[in-house]
Amino acid sequence: MTAATTTQAPNRRDFLYLATGAVGAVGVAAVAWPFIDQMNPDASTLAMASTEVDIAAVPEGQILTIKWRGGPVFVRHRTKKEIEDAQNVELSELRDPQTDASRVQKPEWLIVVGICTHLGCVPIGHEGKYEGWFCPCHGSVYDTSGRIRQGPAPLNLAVPEYKFLTDTRLKIG
């Protein structure tokens, strides 16, 4: 036994159903678009997505604190001793093991987000046993590469996305 199929030619009513559905879909999209579009970030938020910094005036051994995305970023011009200290650390001593080379693009410049990974405090530079940063709130100590060495913080200071535009111009974000 074979099944017989019959096909009907499209009529005017079928066209009207399709046309009404298409116009309705366009209408829904036109009404929904302003609601969807308002969820995009405004211009002031987009402006904070990246920032450029002139680092020519930062003397060796000093830390420049800049504001990026509403929080501090530390730009540290490291001395030869600070670089050597950061490079000569045994990874087995670190809670969150990362080499110094994986945290910097140029050894003399360290760029880290200045927020303690324990509870979000702002650490103080050139403090603590390792002359890196010290968070006075709960006692976390970071070295000259921003790696956690003592205290309750679980992770190293975060390294933001950055690049050197020139030898003295830095873009963060």
Image (cartoon, grey):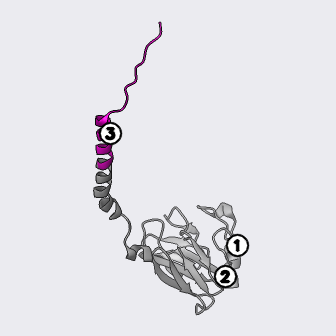
Residue 98, image x, y percentages: 64, 64
Residue 112 seen from this side: yes
Q: Which residue is mark 2?
A: 108
- Which comes sooner in the sequence, label 2 or label 1? 1
Single out the mark in the foreground, 3 or 1.
Answer: 3
Residue 130 seen from this side: no
Report the span colored magenta.
1-23
Q: Which residue is mark 1?
A: 87
- Cα separation between marks 3 and 2: 72 Å
Residue 54 placement, left or right of 24: right
Give the residue displayed 44% in from the left and 77% down from the top.
47
Single out the mark in the foreground, 3 or 2.
Answer: 3
Residue 3, image x, y percentages: 44, 12
Give the residue displayed 28% in from the left and 48% down from the top.
24
Q: Magenta includes 5?
A: yes
Whether tag 2 and tag 1 are in contact, CB under 8 A, the answer is: no
> Circle 2 sits in a helix, a strand or a loop, which is it?
loop
Q: Residue 15 bears which disc, if any?
A: 3
Residue 32, image x, y percentages: 30, 56
- Cα separation between marks 2 and 1: 12 Å
- Which comes sooner in the sequence, label 3 or label 2? 3
> Circle 3 sits in a helix, a strand or a loop, which is it?
helix
Disc 2 crowd rating (10 Å Cα; few below 14, some 14-19, many 20+) is some
Q: Amino acid at mark 1?
A: Gln
Residue 15 placement, left or right of 70: left
Q: Amino acid at mark 2?
A: Glu
Q: Nearer the viewer, residue 31 or 137?
A: 31
